[in-house]
Structure formats: C-alpha cells, structure tokens
Image (cartoon, grey):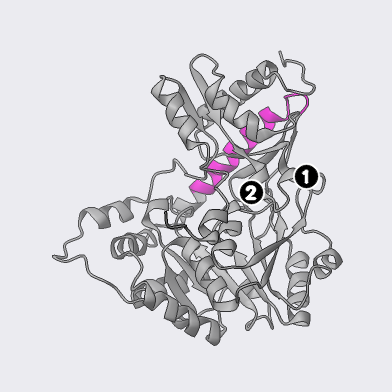
Amino acid sequence: MPKISLKGKNLPTSPIRKLSKYATDAKAKGIDVIHLNIGQPDIDTPAKALQAIQSFDKNVLAYGPSEGSLAYRQKMCSYFAKHNIEVQPDDILVTTGASEAIIMTLDCITNEGDELIIPEPFYANYDTFAAACGVKVVPVSSTIDSNFSLPPIDVIEGKINAKTRAIFICNPNNPTGHVYSKKELNDLATLVKKHDLFLIVDEVYREFIYDGAVHHSVLTISGLEEHAILVDSMSKRYSMCGARIGCLVSKNKEVMDAGLKFAQSRLSPPTLGLHASEAAMDEPLSYLNEVTKTYLERRNTLVGLLQQIPGITVSVPLGAFYCLVQLPIDDTDVFAKWLLTSFNHNGKTVMVAPASGFYGDRSLGKSLIRIAFVLNIERLKESVIILEKALVAYPHTLTLKAHS
C-alpha cells in the first residue's frame, strides 16, 4: 500500500475541530450543543454584501487578477488610511482568507528547517501552517497571571538563532484577547531590526477593542517598512467567514513580488467572495461600531458570570472575542470530550476548545479552555450554567463547590 508523506502524517490536528464528530453524535441524539469552540460570529453579514451576491449578473464566474481587483485594493487602501496605515494598492495582495496570507508569507520568507518565534498560547492553525511549510515554531510562554501580555523581550531574544526568520504575533490576540501596547510593539520592532528578522502581525480583529485599549498596527511603526508584514481578513470584521477573502500587506517589495508568484500559481482569490467583500466595505462605520458594542456586552456578561464560579480563573480580553478560562481540571481535552459524550443539562451541553492545542508545549494548556463569545447573551448565560453544572458533575474536577 502506498504511504502518505511524513508531513501529512505529522501535521497537527485542529484542537478546535477535532471534537466535531462527538458534537455531531450528540446532536443526533437530540442534544442541543452550544458552540463556544469556534470563532464563527452570529452577527448578520452586511446587507450590501448579501445584496451584491444576490444581484450578481455576470454570465460567467470568471478568474480575477491573481493579486485581487484594483478596485478592491483601492478600497482597502482607503480603509487602512482610516487607521493611520498608509499603503498603496501594490502593497496589498488579496488572498483566500487570512490563512492563505499566512501560508504565502511563510513560503516567501522561510526555507525548510527555519524557525518562527510565536508567543504562546497562539491560534492553533499557526502551528499547522508552519508545519506545512516545513518551519519549526519556537514558542515563548505568556501567562494568565499577566493576562497574557508579551513575554519579557530578553526571553524572546534568547530564542533567536541563525535559523530564526520572523517573530509572529496576533493583535488583538486569538486566543487570549490581549491587545499589544505601543511599547510592546516598539520593543519587538527594535528586536527584529537588530537581528534582521521579519515581524508578522495578524490584525484580523483590529476593530474589536475594549476598555479604552488602543490598537497599534505594525505598519504604523516608523523604520519597519522592510521588516513588517500585516495579515488581514474580512471574515471576522464583517461576519463573512465563508467569503474567504483576506490579504497580505507589506511595503517590502521582495516579499510582495515573491507573494505574487505564489498567488499566480493558485490563479485568483474567490471571485464571488471578493465581489461581496468589496460591497461590504460600503457599509457605514456604524455597522462596525454596533458590532463592537455587541461583543463588549457579550464579553462583560460572559466574564462576569464566569468569575462567580468558584475554582476557576478567567482572562479579561481587551480585544477580539475570545477568553481563556482556567478550570479545576487536569485535562481539558478529556473534559471537552466528556461534555459531548456523557453530559447534558436539560438536554443541552456546550462545546469548548481545549487550550492545549494553542501551545507548543501541550502540557501548558491542560487546565485551560478557550471560549468564543460569538453567541447572543441568552445563549452565553445558558452556557455558563451548563458549564458550572458540568464541573460539579464531572468525576475528575479537583475542587469546586456548587454556586447557589
């Protein structure tokens, strides 16, 4: 029998989707599974985007330019300018979601065996993208005690060697919700310039900022033009995950020229998704303001209720729409599966993302889960009740008293 590649065999399994089979089985038994495990917003996609799809009047759904249409890239330039990010259309390469932007970036800047430094916990698919490109992720741990702020810069610098090609962060962060301060970004900028590295920043949650925090884009840092690579997406901003439209943005011409070669090899980004995304950008600013307000209300509700449960610790996110929750559990991978296979409260259960998959060292996240507050407040309230009941019923909970 022919054998598959070692790359295919050893590719990490998604910690977010690996429990899907158990969720499907639970639903088949009539159990209502509340999905807290994945960042799929329930916010309505902008009406202008849906209308653009419905009124699409071309006779042929044809290829578009490999780099994305000029009209869309010009709109992106106008959008970025509102965030004090000055770029030209040639600095933007439209991709099939942020995922392809990251893969293209790694293909452009790394060779087999190179290394990528990422503060952990980090979005699990970063590990998968790196492995697919033959790149080793070198994690640097942040902790819930500091609300997952950037690890000390000297610790990060200690990880740099001849194989290091880039430092990679997500800002605001998935899964922690941390928003990197101007000082943290400037410290990273100084470090990458000192060691002649790239600084890759995934900024797909840029709009979702709370409690007076301020988002600083990597492309606003002076003197970093040759080092900075920004990753962006329409998925979360406009609740258009299925459109699969993202972009790679950089003023480094060598990166952009190499990226275009990879883009040409896959021909073009999705024509219909790009058409809808261009229309979405005509939505008034009030759309994004209302979405951010909605997520803030959800965050406050979720975190406030979780903090009332004895025995758990909750990170308070300043951005994005995730929080990490430390449970009195030895192995949340086992607990998450048990929730779907062996527990329900009034015919309902919750699906969470075990946090071990967000760490390079899987043992570090064994007591943590990630919750996405992308559901309405009533569903979040239900979820907290179910989670508390589950912790009381779970045979391996360490210490917990039922909250009356």
Above or below: residue 52 compared with residue 146: below
Q: Residues within 10 Å of mark 1 (few under 14, many from 20)?
A: some
Is residue 32 in the magenta section? no
Task: State whether residue 325 is above or below residue 292.
Answer: above
Q: Is residue 356 left or right of residue 90?
A: right
For disc 1, the marked residue is: 144
C-beta proximity under 8 Å, tags 2 and 1? no
Left or right: 369 as drawn, with respect to 244: right
- Quarter where residue 132 is shown: bottom right
Query: Residue reaching furthest front?
Result: 1
Q: Main secondary structure of the magenta part?
A: helix
Q: Quadrant of the N terminus?
A: bottom left
Looking at the image, is mark 2 or mark 1 earlier in the sequence? 1
Pick the residue in front: 288 or 2.
2
Residue 81 visible in the current orientation = no
- The crowding category of the residue bearing disc 2, from other C-alpha atoms within 10 Å (few below 14, some 14 to 19, many at least 20), is many
Local secondary structure at mark 2: loop
Q: Position of residue 305 (x, y in %)?
A: 67, 28
Instruction: Report the residue at 62% width, 68% height from top.
Output: 135
Which residue is under mark 2? Answer: 175
Asked if residue 253 lies left or right of residue 358, the reply is left
**Image quarter for residue 181?**
bottom right
Q: Secondary structure under badge 1?
A: helix
Q: Amino acid at mark 2?
A: Pro
Magenta span has 292?
yes
Spatial CA span between label 2 and label 1: 12 Å
Above or below residue 220? Residue 6 is above
How far across and down, in percent of the image, does residue 5 sit? 50, 61
Q: Quadrant of the C terminus?
A: top right
Report the magenta residues as a range: 290-311
